[in-house]
Every structure is written in C-alpha cells, then in structure tokens.
Amino acid sequence: MRIGLVSDTHIPEAGAKIPSQVYDAFQGVDLILHAGDMHIVDVLDWLESVAPVLGARGNGDYATTMPTRPGVPDDPRVKEAHVLQLEGLRVGLIHGFGLPQDITWRTTEELLDLYFKGPVDVVVCGDTHEARIDRYPGLLVVNSGSPTLPNQVLGLGTVAFLDIHGTEVVPSILQLV
C-alpha cells in the first residue's frame, strides 16, 4: 500500500490551486492523508480526483474573518485526529504533534494517549512546514512539510509517502520540481 502525505497547503493564501506537481507525485497512491491547514475543503475534493482522502483539522482550518482563511466546514473526511488501521499498522493523522524532545513534560505514551487514545506505530503530522522523518523506539513520525510554503516561504516544497507492506513501513520525502 502506498500513501501520499501532504500538509499545510494554505489554499487560497499560498495560491489559487494545489501545484500540479502534487497531483503528478500522487499518481498511483492508494490513499492521501492531508495533515491540516488546507484552509478550504476544496483541497480535499481536488485531491480526491487522485485517491481517497482524509484530513486532520489544522489551526488554520477554523473560520476567520480573513478572506484567505475561510475555514473548513464540518466534513466526514476531516477530524482533529484520525487513527487508521493500514495493513498491520496503526497510523495516527494529526496537524500538530510535538516531538518527544520538544515536549519534555509529557512522555511519548502520554502524547499518544492524548491525541490518539492509545499507541500508534506511525504519526503523520504537519504544522511546522518542515519536512522530516523522526524515528523513536516503536514510533515513526513523518511530517511532509508543505508543497506551497516550505519552511514558511512561498515556493514549491515537499510531499511525502508511506510505503506499507504488512508491519514494514518505508517513509520518504519528495522535493517537488
């Protein structure tokens, strides 16, 4: 199973549409997980032309008076956090996930209980716009970065992938060109 990961698209703030390179990169994926800050629900609709989509509600997905952040309405695809059983793995999807070294007042187990009501094997997150893969004992954390605002700067950024075969998972990050 191949899963496309994307976060922090910030549409229409970062542009009118998702860059075509995102669609090209996601051709052939079985599922797309959007880790929040889509800003409009149309982003999920557009991505569904490629594969089924689930999204996590980001801090920028609530309605504001800003025209570039109209908010994402209630939608069955969007939750604060998802827990998915994919192949032999439990995958958690959320917008902001503090890494264990950054939230020293909570254990990793406490964070997983707080956000996912128990352990997961993989956390897919966003929020920082920084693409990264972090490995901890029994936990993989993947942040796909942003395809439109990498490291908070307007431009072509990154998406990521999870290739899952039973309980084996191979994460990767793709710089869009």
Image (cartoon, rainbow, N blue to C red):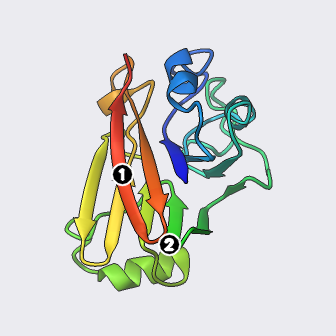
The N terminus, quarter of image: bottom right
Residue occupying image coordinates x 66% and y 23%: 67
Q: Is residue 88 visible?
A: yes
User: Would you call the spot at circle 1 few (<14 residues within 10 Å), some (14-19), or many (20 or more)?
Assistant: many
**Callout 2 crowding tier (Cα within 10 Å): few <14, some 14–19, many ≥20:** some
Answer above or below: position of 87 versus 61: below
Residue picked out by circle 1 = 171
Return the disc, 1 or 2, that comes first in the chain's sequence: 2
Q: Quadrant of residue 11?
A: top right
Instruction: Name the element at disc 1.
Output: strand
Q: Amino acid at mark 2?
A: Leu
Q: Is residue 113 above or below residue 61?
A: below
Residue 36, label in figure? none
Q: Quick check: 28 above or below 122?
A: above
Going by the image, does 102 lie left or right of 60? left
- Residue 86, horizontal then vertical, whole percent: 58, 66
Camera-nearest residue between 50 and 101: 50
Q: Secondary structure at mark 2?
A: strand
Q: Height in image: 119 above or below 70?
A: below
Residue 33 position, x and y percent, is 57, 48
Q: Quadrant of the C terminus?
A: top left
Marks 1 and 2, how far apart in space? 13 Å
Q: Amino acid at mark 1?
A: Pro
What residue is disc 2 on? Answer: 89
Q: How many marks?
A: 2
Instruction: Name the residue rendered at 69%, 33% in the picture.
Output: 40
**Nearer to the camera, 75 or 132:** 132
Q: Position of residue 29 (x, y in %)?
A: 58, 41
Which percent across, then down, holds residue 32?
60, 45
Q: Residue at x 32, y 79 (%)?
A: 108
Question: Mark 2 and mark 1 in contact (Cβ < 8 Å)?
Answer: no
Q: Visible in this render: residue 35?
A: no
